[in-house]
Image (cartoon, grey):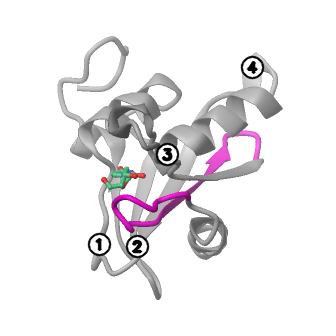
């Protein structure tokens, strides 16, 4: 699963709209029901209006699954020219909205996953979610 998520994340990373940072990011998640969704970062000339790859992947999951299946089991994140990209603080909170402290986050470089951590490790004492902290 780890490799499959990485491949999906790296593929969608090519679609990133990142003309301002030139930092393309891809994210792919699998739900507890086994469905995979992917997304990339989408920047904007008005810089604060851009959003992260994880947000795109989560939006695809929300659009594509019934409410009962919207739980993230694992998510992989990859970026260009980055040894081991980690989700930004805002995205940790976004993953938390649909995850648990056991949700696995695969941190990747352009060749594959290099580390796997739990959301509980990435976002201890998380706001607003039972079980994470
Ligand atoms: N970015 C992501 O897509 N995910 C993260 O977790 C960190 C940052 C994007 C946002 C922006 O388009 C670019 O990376 C540079 O910050």
> Which of the two residues, 22 or 74, is positioned nearer the viewer here?
22
Picture coordinates of residue 10, whole percent (x, y):
58, 73
Q: Upstream in the sequence, badge 1 or badge 4?
A: 4
**Which mark lies nearer to you, 2 or 3?**
3
Q: Residue at x 37, y 14 (%)?
A: 130
**Of the numbered discs in the image, which one, if any, rests on residue 84?**
1
Q: Upstream in the sequence, badge 3 or badge 1?
A: 3
**Tag shown at residue 19:** none
**Label 3 residue SS:** helix
Magenta span covers which residues?
17-34
- The correct choice, above or below, for 117 with respect to 82 in the image is above
Q: Residue at x 31, y 65 (%)?
A: 85
The C terminus sits in image quarter: top left
Q: Does the magenta run of residues contain 30?
A: yes
Residue under pointer 3:
54
Mark 1 sits near ligand 1, with its Cβ under 8 Å away:
no
Q: Are marks 1 and 4 in contact (CB under 8 Å)?
A: no
Query: Residue beneath label 2, please?
Result: 108
**Taking 70 as reference, is 67 above or below it?**
above
Left or right of residue 125: residue 115: right
Quadrant where the N terminus is found in the figure: bottom right
Is the Cβ of the residue at disc 2 closer than 8 Å to that at disc 1?
yes
Asked if marks 4 and 3 touch (Cβ < 8 Å), the reply is: no
Cα gap from disc 2 to disc 3, whole angstroms: 14 Å
Q: Secondary structure at mark 1?
A: loop
Q: Nearer the viewer, mark 2 or mark 4?
A: 2
**Could you say whether the residue bearing mark 2 is in a helix, strand or loop?**
strand
Secondary structure predominantly adopted by residues drawn in magenta: loop
């Amino acid at each position: 699963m780890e490799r499959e998520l990485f491949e999906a994340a790296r593929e969608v990373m090519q679609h990133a709209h990142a003309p301002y940072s030139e930092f393309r990011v891809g994210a792919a998640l699998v739900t507890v029901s086994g469905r995979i969704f992917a997304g990339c970062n989408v920047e904007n000339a008005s810089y604060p209006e851009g959003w992260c790859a994880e947000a795109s992947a989560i939006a695809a999951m929300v659009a594509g699954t019934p409410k009962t299946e919207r739980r993230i089991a694992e998510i992989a994140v990859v970026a260009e020219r980055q040894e081991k990209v980690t989700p930004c603080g805002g995205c940790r909170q976004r993953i938390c909205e649909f995850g648990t402290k056991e949700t696995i986050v695969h941190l990747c470089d352009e060749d594959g996953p290099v580390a796997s951590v739990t959301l509980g490790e990435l976002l201890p004492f998380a706001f607003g979610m039972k079980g994470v902290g």
